[in-house]
Amino acid sequence: MPARRGSAGPVFDDGRVRVWRTHDPDLGVLLHKEALGEGALERIAHEASVLRRLEGVPGVPRLRSSVDPCVLVAAASDGRSLAEALAERRLTPPEVLALGQQLAATLEAVHEAGVAHLGLHPGTVLLVEDGGVELVDFTLATMIAEVRPGFTHHREILGPLPYLSPEQTGRTGSAVDRRSDLYAVGAVLYEAATGRPPFIEEDAFELLREILTREPTPVTALDPTLPAGLEAVLARLLEKEPDRRYQSAAGLAHDLARVAADTGTTFPLGERDFPDRLSPPTQLIGRDREIAVLTEALDAVADPAEPSSGAPACRVVLVSGGPGVGKSALVSTLRRLVTRRGGWFVSGKADQVVRDSSAGLRWALRGLARLLLAEPPAALEARARELRQRLRSNASVLVAIAPEFAQVLGESGAAAVLDEREREDRIQQSVVDLLQVVASPSRPLVLFLDDVQWAPPSALDMLDAIVNAPGMDGLLLVGAYRDTDVDARLAAIVGSWERLAVKPTRVRLAPLDVDDLATLLEHVLRLPAGQSAVLAGVLGERTGGNPFDTIELLNSLRDDGALALADGGWTWDAAAVRHHVGRSDVVALLTARIEDLGPDAAHVLGVMACLGAEVSGTDLATACGLTAGQLVTHLGRPLAAGLVTAARGGRPTTDAVLGRLRFRHDRVQQAAFERLGAEERRAVQARTGWRLAAAGRGLHAARQLLAADVRPLDADERERVVRLYRWAADDERRRTEFTAAEQFLAAAARILRDDPATAHQHFEVESERHQVLYQLGRLDEADTVYASLSGGARDDRELAQITAIQVASLTNRHMYGAAVELGLRVLARLGVPYPEPDAAIEVACGLAEVVAWTKGLDAVAARGRPVLTDPTAAALAAVMGRLSPAAFFSAPLVSGWLVTRAQRLWEEHGPSTDLMAVLGHAPVAFIAVLDEYHAGEVLLTHLLATGEAHGWERAVAYTRFLHTVSSAHWFQPLDACVPTAKQARDGLLHVGDLPQACWSYVPVVVDTFETAPHLDQSLPELAAALALAERTGILPVQRSFSIIRRFCHEARAGTDASTSPPPQAPGEQAVEALAESNTVVGAYLWLFRSISAALLGDWERLAANSRAAYRRAQRLPGIVITLMTTVPFGLDLSLQLRRQPPGGPAHTALLSELDDVLDWLRRRAHDQPANVAHLVSYLEAERAWALGDHDGALVAFDSALSAVQRVSRPWHHALLARRAGELHRERGLEHSGRLHLAEAKQVLLDWGADAMAAEFDRAHPFLRDRSIARATTSGSRAAISAHPVLQADTIDTTAILRVAQALAAQTTMPQLHDAIVEQLRAITGATAVRVVLRDESAGWRVYRPATDTVGDAALDDPALDDSAFDDPALDDSAFDDSAFDEDGAAALVPVSAVRYVLRTREALAVDDATADDRFAQDPYLADEQRLALLVVPVLRAAELRAVLVLENRLTSGAFTTDRLGFVTMLTGQLAVALDNAQVYTSLERRIAERTTALRSANAQLELLSSTDALTGVANRRRFDAALAAEWTRSLETALPVSVLMVDVDRFKQYNDDHGHLAGDACLVEISRLLAAGLRDTDLLCRYGGEEFAAILPRADLAAAVDVAERMRLAVEDARLPHTGDVGVVTVSVGVASSPASTRSQGSELLARADLALYAAKRAGRNCVRTQV
């Protein structure tokens, strides 16, 4: 080209840029660069900004002024380009090494200035006259730490392709950073040494493919004279994966200098190679003891010892320590350990800013779903089936938590949306059910929640539910928290675990001591031990051994030059280091680093900190008010400083900026957040909120506006904010984040509160908040809100809705009187007043009417009745439903009255769930008022049928509970009530009604206590009940169960935590004081004291408690303890009766009381004798004894003992036997008396009441000499267990067109397969491509190439693999592992990853499948060090047609779904091409199949020949058919069939001695002899080898034995010669005979004959044996 403007000569012109040289007398050589075409001005401006930043850096041109904005002028050194020099000759090895050192030195300075060149090639390297080098052309340079280039047209990839790193092509998932320059240095030096670049393909696509998939030819293979050290350095520079290259130019320069100094030596590379930011070693230092504790906990989960009775199976480990000590890294060691055991590791992390979200826990559960989706089909289907059975209607709850479970569960996950009232209640149970199904000792699960100190209450409650749930075998729950930030909620929950004997394993992670700190520095800096110890002493003074703080200080020291890397290693000045580290703490250092980044970067980090620990790039750009490009620029320095990283491998994203971003550590977020200051932070959050709201990011916007405490300026803004807050609250409630929902609603209420125009809207918001406060358990606050709402309702129905919740709130706090008073007041306002003056009469009459109504109930007709819809009736029912439990405990008449009103509503308006709840209390009212038992049983049965017909799951569960607690035991045996009680309990747990589930444990525990053969059988239910009572805070239940546990503890004399009573919390009311005011607690306290006193003969204690227990129980009519209290009370009455003179008033009164008890028991015994008859006889015995009728007493005791032995009532039995023994001895019947007392002791021992049995010994010393055996029943303690985008910047349209044309040109499957593989490997960098096809006839198949090589090896005519896989049970969407032999699919593809995509129908990108828990166990990965995967589904018309499997063994993170969206774009064309090719292939295959079928048919005809080729007798197939026919005939005739099995004795020896030909002749002769002894109707066959079998139709055993004996003699008499001592050939015969039966098959008869044959062999051979 002609020179311009005083040009000294042209340099370059490619149409985009024109470069020429001039010479200035003062400035020397000047380079002029003119940008051309689109974006010219921007490109010149960009390069000028880079050069300004590099001002003064040696080896870089110096920017000079220019009058033309499109022309850049720079002063450069005089010289020529390396490209010109290489065009003449390649360099000598010393020249190459010198060039490399010069390039490394220049790049080191460029990189330290924060610039990456990214366009280095021989044309941009100037060789100057003084022997140095100068880098020119900074067009592509960047000043950010890393970029992720778009998928660019290959003609638009700037810079010559041969020198570009794989990540610069845009075809991998790796970031482009300074290490890309080092790759280019390697390519330049490679060409300088060999005369050619590493890859030399002319076709751009093929060149790209080689860059991505091939290793360059070693330089010594091209020139053996080159030094081996140079070859090693070049190989490291040209690594595909950036992490395996040199990390710094300084490290490269050091190694090149060593090679240059001695070209004949080799040494470990990278000794002085350190990354920009130092990081801790992957191996934990100084944590061996803590790792051992975690390992032991995992071992205990994976190989549990027999758990103590009642102990939860879940193991808990709590890891605490200060920030930065390495808690997360420590727990992460469990991932490798649990994976080795075939188990799983899932984790989530709470956020220090967004503390009202359970996202961390939900993310862990979503991770578990993704692991399940990678399971083999059979395993997944089994787990999914069990999950569906356990979850039932809760499946939708689980899907709401973790949407991936919709794919795990199938259609079950798409259930209808639940009533919000039930959602939170059910969520905990659904997660518990999930973990109980998934975790097992054989496949343990580690669930890790990090930063628990920031977890919201809902997440903590979830952890509490998991910990206290029984049946969590195989689950290890790990929580990590800062012990300096523990709040009261977390402390309370952990404290409750301690009280309930969960006993978490605690790991306190302290900072490293000075020796371990020295070891850490030794690893990080590669220091000698002595130097690391010195530096550790200096740093430890400030960091105290905190690993994170230490690494941060190292980087800070390095930035400030106080720590420097010299030729001899690291150097530092101790005084300077002390001065530096003594200035401030780490957070302050981080804050200073953020300030040093400049205002733009610091602002972005501040906004990011407000959004959370991890955010999407798009949201961050929106929040900052920046474009994507501006955000990239602002993030450059934070990324370079290592403060922010790309959250790769995290949540799925299609973000077009930088994917998801996260702070490198919590301390960085803390520093960025606190740096803003309160006022500035609120202003930032307000601006951020409005920007996000405008972009439609409602929840994020609402969170920021809430944090900023935004005060609307006008009505329009107020409306926007309130609408946004209410929308956010609804969204949070749908996810059961009620804490966050309440905050939004409270803020909305504050905004609306003072404006009369918004009064109704304010009422609506406060009503919603009232309900949320109730669900959060913040009941005192709910009271305040209700008080403000009660006067603002527009009508009584509106008031009723909030009152129903308030009544429930009062009831939950045991404020029964207040609840009743409030409920009745609102019912009166609704027109249903309570009849105060005549309540007793009206209630009695009303209940009598209800009893009469029950007699005409028709369950069938009730199923068709319309349900209640009237608004007023619904409001009444809602209040009555919530009022009924409170009335039950405090106002029996009100409870009865509610039943009468509910019955009228039911009849007038139809059934409803609320009315079921009220009517469910009818049995208690019937008993209390009318002494009527049968009507309650009838009514409850009808209610259950109605509820089940309407699908009212919660109402049915609650009604079933009421049935078991108040009615069932009066009409069913008590032991039969236990399963029903458990069903009710499980139903309430399933719907998540935890308070009622807690109460439902009462019949479960009490009925089990009464009927279980051993006390320990009560303990698992008791432990679970106490845990739930602790969680729900239902004090009466918790105290009642504690009373029972104390009884068990004292009776067993146990020391284990499962029965020891929980310690009383500070300020907690003593149980005795509570018993005085609470009916339930009083009844249980005095009842169990009475039982203990009665069993031990402590009559004084019995008298002090039995009457109180009986009277309290009378206030709980219908409950089973009303029956239990009659035993000790009746005994006490009898004892007192004996002490009173007959005829006196006291005697008469006591006798009358005892007779009343007996009369009541007799009526109950009439309805259910199994539960009561023995008690009637017992108290009749005590009565007779007290009245002096000793003979009558003896007879009654005998009757009572006989009755009690027919049922399982251990303590009843023990008491009856004791009292009988005492009566016998009193009457002089010493022997029989001692026998009864021994019986009582034996019953106590069998029951597990060892301490009580010991008391028997003390009271009756003679019992010590009696030998009493402990029963070893299934109820023994030993048998009891406690188990119960990057999107394209410019889409490569040429590549897509090229692929589409290639695919469309193919009409056969082999051709299409070749085209797919060739094109995808070329444009994606995949080292291998597999195609999985869906074939209509054969299901899913791997299309197998003939060879499997990385590179250009030809793919010869592949064919469909015969080891194809198919699983029709999963709708052709999964694999059948049984088809995976070593030549099958498992050897060709990672089956688990393909299976995952078939199930999710979404593209899957995995950085390294060998490190992904979902796929790491796949056999395909067994010997792989790394494997990047991209698995893409091919869909057509929503139908899955194929799956593409792309892999790269050279580079981790080679693919990402957002970067390779173009692959998905090609799948539509691919689907069409597949359809066409499969039509052709299918026709060809059908022809081949028919040909094969004909051949197979001919072969089958031969195979099915009925004659044995050697002997001429029938073969085995004929035998099997004949036996089946005879068996069928025998079924019709009932005549026997006999089978004989015959074996030639020692025939192997015969073959060995005489040869096989002689052996064949022998078999022929034996078959002739055997056949001669058979009837015409019999059949002889050669069964196999030397074995024969015969079928004898209609022959009984005797006849068959005769035939068998004839056959044996015929062979023996033939005297066929054998060898040695054997003499002659003989046979052994086994005989079996039987008529056919529908309960068995002919094969069983054959098996018996075979057993008989072996019996004959064992008996010495040459004999006949039978098998009946």
Image (tube, grey):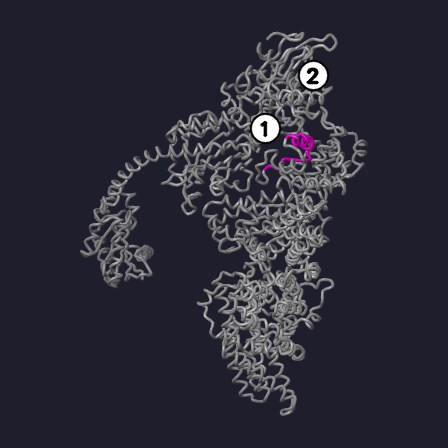
State the image quarter where residue 1031 is shown: bottom right
Q: Tell which of 1504 and 1486 is nearer to you.
A: 1486
Q: The magenta stretch spans which residues?
A: 629-648
Q: Could you tell me the amino acid type at mark 2?
A: Pro
State the image quarter where residue 677 is shown: top right
Residue 387 in the magenta stretch? The answer is no
Q: Tell which of 1125 and 1424 is nearer to you.
A: 1125
Q: CA distance from mark 2 to mark 1?
A: 27 Å
State the image quarter where residue 1483 is shown: top left
Q: Tell which of 157 and 586 is nearer to you.
A: 157
Examine the rendered structure and indicate whether residue 828 appears above or below residue 1529: below
Q: Quadrant for the C terminus, please.
A: bottom left
Q: Dot 2 corresponds to which residue?
A: 61
First-in-chain label (2 vs 1)? 2
Q: Dot 1 corresponds to which residue?
A: 149
Residue sitting farthest toward the bottom: 1143
Q: Position of residue 763 (x, y in %)?
A: 67, 56
Residue 781 visible to the viewer: yes
Q: Could you tell me the amino acid type at mark 1?
A: Pro
Examine the rendered structure and indicate whether residue 1369 appears above or below residue 1632: above
Q: Position of residue 1649 (x, y in %)?
A: 30, 57
The main secondary structure of the magenta stretch is helix
